[in-house]
Image: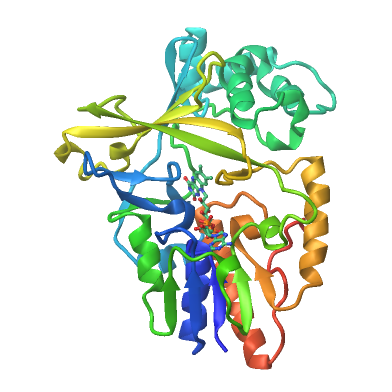
Amino acid sequence: MRYCIVGAGFSGAVIARALAEAGQKVLVIDERGTAGGNCHSERDADTGVMVHVYGPHIFHTGNERVWDYVQKFGDWVPYNHRVQAVAGGRVFSLPVNLLTINQFFNRVMSPDEARAFIAAQAQKIAEPQNFEEQALSMIGPDLYRAFFRGYTRKQWGVEPTELPASILKRLPVRFTYEDSYFAHPHQAMPRDGYTEVVKAILDVPGVEVRLSTRFEDLDESFAHVIFSGPIDRYFNYEFGRLGYRTLDFERFTHKGDFQGTAVLNYCDEDVPFTRITEHKHFAPWERDKFEGSVLYREFSRLCGPEDIPYYPIRQTNEEAMLRKYVERAKATPGVSFVGRLGSYRYLDMDVTIAEALDASDRMIAAIREGQSLPAFFVEPLGA
Ligand SMILES: Cc1cc2nc3c(=O)[nH]c(=O)nc-3n(C[C@H](O)[C@H](O)[C@H](O)COP(=O)(O)OP(=O)(O)OC[C@H]3O[C@@H](n4cnc5c(N)ncnc54)[C@H](O)[C@@H]3O)c2cc1C
C-alpha cells in the first residue's frame, strides 16, 4: 500500500520525495489547485510580476543541510531583505537600529551614546509580566509606542498586556546601522518562484500529485497518512477550533514604482493595515522590466471557520486545547502530523524543511525496521 501525504507545501513535498527515493509509493494531495502550500507564488495576470499569493516570503537560513537541499531544486538569487516603517507620518528603518534611534530622537548619537540614552529611557520593572512591560523595561515608552504598541495590537488583535513577556526575549534594538531584517548567512529568492521549487521537489518517480482534492473526500486505504493540514480539522474539531489569525490582502496596482521597497510596515493604529507589500521588489533582477506594479495591503484579524489559518495564536486556552489534540493524535494509529498546521506552530520555511528532512530520515529508518510511525516527529507542546 502506498503512503498518503496531505498537503503539497514544503512539509509534504520534502517528505514525499524522501519516501519515494527510499522506494515507497506516495500519493500527495492538496485541496488547493496549486502546489507550494502557503509559499505559493505565481505571475500576476495584469502586470507579469511574481506575486507571493499568501503573503511575503523571504527564504533565510543558517542550516547548511537545508541550504544545500533547496539549491538542487531551483536557481536562488541572493536577496537581502530590508524593511522600512511608517510611524507618526515619518519613515524609519526597521528593525529599530542606530539610524532609527537617531532619526526618531533627532540626534547624532554613537552606539555607546545611544545605548546609554535608551537605557535611561527604559523603565525599571523588576519582573516584566507581559509584552508591554517587557518592552518598556527594554526600550522605554517612546520607541515602544511608535513601533511596537499599535503594530502588535493590529497584528494580534489583543492588548500587548495580554501577550507573554517571552515574545520579546532579546533587546529589539540594534546599536549599529545594520538594517538587514534577517541575520542568517543565506538569504535568497527563488528565481522562478517558490511553487516551481516545490514542484521540482515533487517531480520524482513514485510520487503522484493530485491537486484540488480534499483528504476528507478520499476513499482509499493507505500504509500511513502524513498530515500537514490543521490537526484540529483532522479530528473534526472535536475539542474546538485552535485559534489562528488570518490575513486579508487588498490587491491594488500602480504604474511604475509605488513605494520603492518590498515591505513597508505601518505602525500607527489609525492606519487599519499592518503593511504594504510591493511584490516586484522581491525580484530586483527583473523588476525594471515591468511597467506596472502589484501591491497588497495586509490586514490581520481573527480566523473564522471559512478563512485561511495563518498565525497560530497559542495563548493559554489554545495550549490546553492543543494538549487534547496531541493526546488524541498519539492514541490514533496510522497518521503522523507534520508542518506548521499539523503541529500548530509558526515555522519559517527553513525550519519546515529541516523538520521534514529529519522526519523523513526517521520514517525511512522505522519503515526499514518494520516499526510503526509516531504521531509526531517534533513535540508540538515542546520537550
Ligand atoms: C504571512 C506569512 C508570511 C511568512 N513569511 C515567511 C518568510 O518570509 N520566510 C519564511 O521562511 N517563512 C515564512 N512563513 C512561513 C511559511 O509560510 C511556512 O514555513 C510554510 O508554509 C510551511 O509549510 P507547510 O508545508 O508546513 O504548510 P503549508 O504551506 O500551509 O501547506 C499545507 C497544505 O495542506 C493543504 N491542506 C490542509 N488541509 C487539507 C486537507 N484536509 N485536504 C487537502 N489539503 C489540505 C493546504 O491547502 C496547504 O496547501 C510565513 C508564513 C506566513 C503565515
Q: Is residue 153 above or below residue 270?
A: below
Please state, as top left, top right, bottom left or bottom right, where the N terminus lies in the image.
bottom right
Quarter of the rendering containing residue 55: top left
**241 in relation to 374, above or below:** above
- Judged left or right of residue 114, residue 276 is left
Residue 145 screen position, x and y as percent: 62, 15
Q: Nearer the viewer, residue 135 or 242?
A: 242
> Looking at this view, is 11 or 144 the one in front?
11
State whether residue 61 appears in this view.
Answer: no
Q: Residue furthest top?
A: 106
Residue at 54% x, 29% y is 174
Q: Is residue 166 above or below residue 144?
A: below
x, y (%) of residue 112?
Answer: 57, 21
**In this image, 5 relative to 285: left or right?**
right
268 with respect to 234 (left or right):
left
- Tell which of 187 and 158 is nearer to you: 158
Report whether 271 appears left or right of 383: left
Instruction: Answer with the quarter of the image where residue 287 lies.
Output: top left
The one of 108 and 122 positioned closer to us in this rendering? 122
What scheme was used to colour the molecule? rainbow
Task: Tell me where residue 216 appears, x and y as whole percent.
Answer: 60, 66
Point out the image quarter for the C terminus.
bottom right
How many numbered discs?
A: 0
* Residue 211, visible in the rendered structure: yes
Residue occupying image coordinates x 77% and y 56%: 381
Residue 9 position in % (x across, y down): 48, 61
* 54, above or below 153, in the image: below
Quarter assignment of residue 226: bottom right
